[in-house]
Amino acid sequence: MATGRTSVSSSSATSGHVIANLALLLFLLILSLNPPVPTAAAALEHEVEEGSGGRRPFLVKKGERETTVSTEDGEVSTVRISDGIGNGRFHIESITLEPNALFLPVLLQSEMVFYVHTGSGNISWTEESETKQVEVEKGDIYRLEPGTVFYIESSPSSDSEKLRIYAFFANAENDLHEPAIRPYSSIRDLILGFDKSVLEAAFGVPSEAIEEITEGADPGGIVHGLKKEESRRDREFAFMRALLGGNGYVVFIPGENKKNKLFNVFSNEPDFKNCNGWSTVVTKKQLSALKGIDISVFMVNLTKGSIMGPHWNPRASEFGICLHGQGMVTVVCPSSGNRTSCKNMRFHVEEGDVFAVPRFHPMAQVAFNNDSFVFMGFSTAAKNNHPQYLAGKASVLRTLDRDILSVSLDAKNTTVDKILNQQEQAIILECTSCAEEEFKVMKEEIQKEKEEEKKKKEEEEKKKKEEEEKKKQEEEEKKKQEEEEKKKQEEEEKRKQEEEEKKKQEEEEKKKKEEEEKRREKQEKEREEEEEEAKKRQEEEAKKKEEEEQRREEEEAARREEEAKKKEEEAKKREEQRQKEEEARKKEEEAKEKEKQRKKEEEEEAARKEEEERREEAARKEEEERREEESRQKKEEEAAKQHKEEEEEEEEERHEGGGWEWGEEGPAGMDMDWGRKVLNKKKKKKDMNGA
């Protein structure tokens, strides 16, 4: 849907009604000139034949949407619709949030152009190293690019309307069909796609924190909004910094920023407006965010009993969404080459329905007398698309030669001039009861199609019944032939069976005689074997008795020998026990002797060590005295004299001791105590001299 800014002059209600009827007459005339018969049933079934390629939806009713998210705080429903051109479909979503609800963050994987139908709220998204946020309200239009992470919050006021958003998702700037993958993915799904170890390393947090996320329940896409006491902006900062890194910052878009400014259809003058309604188109000229993508947004408001004049788009396909009321949409097939691949259609559109109008297909939208008809939508071409109107000042028919046009329409020149020149208005016209007439025709066509379908079905059933009857007769004839053939085969088999039975009987008699002969021979042989076996048993019993007697004698001898051997072993054991006791007694005495000797040696060793320690102590003290004497020149002589006296005393003591060596006892029966007394006496003398 595209319109130009056209100035119009007011006219009387009567002339406007006549003009509207003439425009509708011309449109219906074009419908009648198109050979394919209008198929309203196809419109109500929301599908149209496409050659041999199956069926494509051109209308999706509100109840036929696919619900992808549904919680108590909101829902998301999806429409996949074709424009009948190419093999692709287009993706439109309706996002509805209850007051104070939150559409959880998602990663956008496609182009997104959206329109706010009702309510208000905030949309926040990432863009490079920034986080941006805008407040949205009814009538706002904006675009988000692939790769951004965004989330939506509805107004927290319980008295506010639900926030309803219609969004068009495109695969790329120059490919407006639905994305090959989902338009967006939830942040939760993206995080849970990694192993716990990877998440721990990436976020630098302990496993407990990661487990809290991975083991938590799926919130469902839409949840209740933040509590009032929590700082929503602080939460936004924290979330977006986590996505953007430490250098990320948040930008709240001001109203004067033209680049990021939203366009609101209700805050701007429409492209066209008169008493019958208004229309507007939003392109990159009005909204800079639409630059680089071939998508425009349109909105049309038709008052009661008015019509959007018949027109077509040379470059764009349209996808409309009914926002309010109801209306009739008529679409004309521009081609008459294939009657099955392209059909004229009438749509009865109600609030929430989505309909498509392919490129080059003339169309008209009509409001009923009892209510207005408001719809908006998305066009697949945002530039160089100038809609061509059939009636009014902008009619493309005015550029054609009158004579050629008269021949084409099979009408007089005066009639063609009247149709083309009498209409002073364009775009939106009065058309009282036009929608009701279209609806009536649609129902009649539906009924006609049902009757034709019923008749066709009856004919097909009749034909099928005849074919089944013929097939049944053929099967019966075939069955009869098969039965005769089977009977012949059975008789032949019976004859063969009788011959085989006779032959078998003869063979059995012969076999019986042979078996009888074999049985007699066997019985004779068994008798001889029994006699032989009895003789053999007698011999074995005699042999067995002889062996038993011999075995008893051998056992008796072995028993006596075993008893003698046992007595001998007992005597031997008693002797060994006595010897062991004797050896134990000797060992015990030897151990006592050794223990006595060991204690004696330990005492002597202790005395020897004590003597050595005393001598070492004495030597140490002598060394200290020598050093003191060397430092004192005055006492050298006294030290020498004292040393000499000590040596004489030691000599005297050796003479007194008799020159014996230490052993277990001293000289003349003296023990070690005497030696210790002599040494103590010597030490005492040394200590006195040192003092």
Image (cartoon, rainbow, N blue to C red):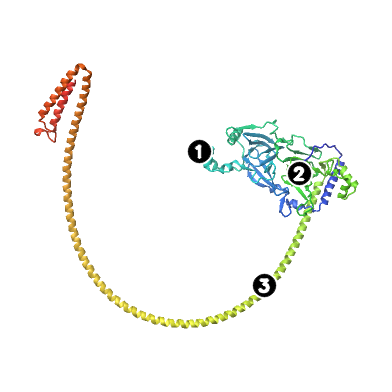
Q: Earlier in the sequence, mark 1 or mark 3?
A: 1
* Label 2 vs label 3, nearer the camera: 2
Which residue has dot 2 on it? 315
Q: Residues within 10 Å of mark 2 (few under 14, many from 20)?
A: some
User: Residue flagged by tag 3: what amino acid is it?
Assistant: Lys
Which residue has dot 1 on it? 206
Q: Please give left or right for residue 335 compared with residue 610 in the image.
A: right
Residue 577 visible in the picture:
yes
Which residue has dot 3 on it? 479
* Label 2 vs label 1, nearer the camera: 2
Q: Is residue 508 above or below residue 232?
A: below
Residue 160 visible in the picture:
no
Q: Residue furthest left?
A: 668
Across and down, in percent, residue 448 comes to 79, 56
Across and down, in percent, residue 328 comes to 78, 47
- Determine the residue positioned at 89% across, 44% down: 418
Q: Residues within 10 Å of mark 3 (few under 14, many from 20)?
A: few
User: Residue flagged by tag 1: what amino acid is it?
Assistant: Pro
Q: Please give left or right for residue 208 compared with residue 640 in the image.
A: right
- Determine the residue positioned at 50% across, 38% down: 206
How far is disc 2 from disc 1 in space, using C-alphas?
57 Å
How far is disc 1 from disc 3 in space, using C-alphas?
81 Å
- Helix, strand or loop at mark 1: loop
Q: Work out whether residue 639 or residue 603 is closer to the camera in this orientation and state it.
A: 639
Res 339 quadrant in image: bottom right
Identify the image quadrant of the N terminus. Answer: top right
Across and down, in percent, residue 689 comes to 17, 21
Across and down, in percent, residue 397 comes to 84, 44
How far is disc 2 from disc 3 in space, using C-alphas?
65 Å
Identify the image quadrant of the C terminus. Answer: top left
Q: Work out whether residue 343 or residue 123 is closer to the camera in this orientation and state it.
A: 343
- Helix, strand or loop at mark 2: loop
